[in-house]
Image (cartoon, grey):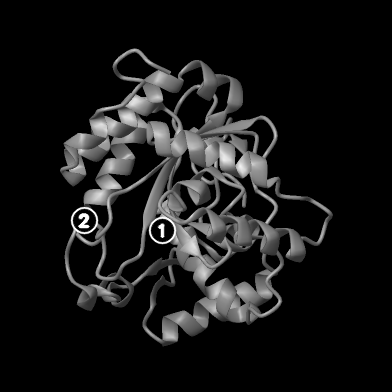
Amino acid sequence: MKPRDEPLRNAQVVVDREPQLPTLVKSAARVLQIFDFFDEVQREAKVQEIADQLEFPQSSTSVLLRSLVEMGFLDHDPQARTFLPSPRVALLGHWLGQGPMRDGTIVRMLEEIAAATGESVVLATRNGLYAQDVRVIQGRGAQPVALPQGLRRLVVWSATGLALLRDEPDDLVQALCRRANAEAEDGAAVDPRTVAAHLGQLRREGYVFSRGLVTPGLGSIAMPLPAGLDRGARLFAIAVTGRLADIAARERELVSAMRRAIARHLSAPALLTNHMDDGGA
């Protein structure tokens, strides 16, 4: 996906290699990508822009948008020729109740971290064999990395994925490594020793630092969030992502900023106690 907003024009845009999704119904997937697009740009948009940014054929994009207007999920301004999600979209899921995931606390926390660090910040959760981004706040630093919404990465081979596995037994983690290798289509192999080393760091220090694990030249620092953020038992993790050299040089600063924000917004003061803040590494 391409950068969309003026502040991102000089950003390094990263589209991680995603697994093939042969079971997806293409039109259904495209509808959800359209909503992801609006969630990111947060303004009206024309057919051509949506088609260009999502790399969809313009004709099928136009058909999908008209269908969503007829169903009441999009509003259409015929004079400006723009589309915007309707209140019906805003009300979807309101029955799931309140809490940090629904009352805006999580988004405010992500925005605070992005503002403090200048780097892109990701909220992810587990989706089977993968960790999937459910929210991305784009960085606004001098050389930010722009990340598309909705990316999936192997849960055993990504910073957010490993953060989500912190409390899982080692035999389950090893089984996930074997499954990932068995399903790999391009010969890429997950090294169980590397996975174990990352989990060791996570369990000792409370975060995992991925150095080019998914995309060469990029670094991510990820932490699991406290349980119970939504109605179910789903776990979430956050990550700060940027150019590897920048993330490595600012490791202490970034870890501290993440911990402070988590503690302030999610009432988890124990997360502030760590080796890095007291001078250890």
Q: How many marks?
A: 2
The numbered mark at residue 39 is: 1
For the residue carrying disc 1, how many other residues have a C-alpha within 10 Å: few (<14), some (14-19), or many (20+)? some
Asked if one can make out residue 94 in the rendered structure from this viewpoint, the answer is yes
Between 263 and 144, the one nearer to me in the picture: 263
| Residue 186 % position (x, y) | 83, 56
**Percent position of residue 183, x then y:** 74, 65
> In what quadrant of the picture does the C terminus appear?
top left
Check disc 1 and report its element: helix, strand or loop: helix
Picture residue at 61% right of the left edge, 73% below the top: 61
Name the residue located 32 percent from the left edge and 48 percent from the top edge. 225
27 or 205, nearer to the observer: 205
In the picture provided, is 129 more to the left or to the right than 228?
A: right
SS at circle 2: loop
Using the rendered view, name the quadrant where residue 234 is placed.
Answer: bottom left
Disc 1 marks which amino acid? Asp
Is residue 150 among the parts visible in the rendering? Answer: no
**Which residue lies under the disc numbered 2?**
100
Looking at the rendered structure, the kind of residue marked 2 is Pro
Residue 214 located left or right of residue 165: right
